Image (spheres, helix red, strand yellow):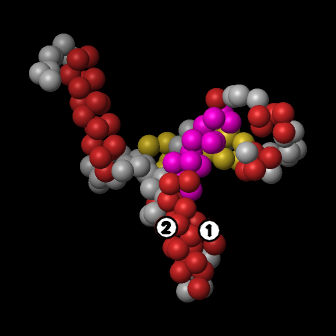
Amino acid sequence: DSLLLRGWAVQRCPETPIVSTNVDADSAAQPAVWCLQETVANPTMRDVDTYSVRNEAAFHACEQTIGRYGQEIAALVAERKEEGGSLPDILRAACHGPAKCAGSARNARRKKRRQRGARGVAAGKSQEL
């Protein structure tokens, strides 16, 4: 809630930047559709407490990254800051490292299997389970 109360909101990315969300090199980069953007006016407590898909998405994104990997992220940020790294580079490294923003290799393999299965079904092929 505090992130939303400070004026950040989940919105469609303005230019849909290409971000590599794949773990293996065989897969192509996927476009990032949703971004966390700072808004002009801070929302009210009622706006934040009212259910919306975007508010729920922000909650789950924070829970699955900072909530789950907070200690690892903090350790990396502190270490890199002591080494004199720039904050944007440090945060990018934290996102792609301990926060696992790109997802796990296991999820990437599952997604790849689902895509192959969908192509087989579309082509009229059957698959054994």
Quick check: is 56 in the magenta stretch? Answer: yes
Tell me if residue 117 comes above or below residue 49 in the rendering.
above
In this figure, which residue is indicated by the disc labeled 1? 88
Q: Which residue is mark 2?
A: 72
| Disc sitting over residue 27 in the figure | none
Query: Is residue 110 in view?
Result: yes
Amino acid at the residue labelled 1: Pro
| Viewer can see residue 16 | no
Furthest-top residue in view? 124
- In percent of width and height, residue 92 lies at 54, 64
Q: Residue 36, image x and y in percent?
A: 66, 47
Q: Is residue 64 left or right of 52 when viewed as pictured? A: left
The amino acid type found where label 2 is placed reads Glu
What predominant SS class does the magenta segment belong to? helix
Of the numbered discs 1 and 2, the one sitting upstream in the chain is: 2
Please identify, in this view, whether the residue under mark 1 or under mark 2 is nearer the observer.
Answer: 2
Above or below for 117 versus 73: above
Instruction: Please give left or right for residue 114 compared with residue 125 in the image.
Output: right
- Residue drawn where x is 64% and y is 29% of the image: 53
Number of other residues with Cα within 10 Å of mark 2, as a class: few under 14, some 14 to 19, many 20 or more: some
Task: Assign the N terminus to one quadrant of the image.
Answer: top right
- The residue depicted at 62 percent of the width and 68 percent of the height is 88
Residue farthest to the bottom?
83
**The stretch drawn in magenta includes residue 88:** no
Q: Magenta stretch?
A: 54-66
Give coordinates of residue 112: x percent, y percent. Answer: 28, 37
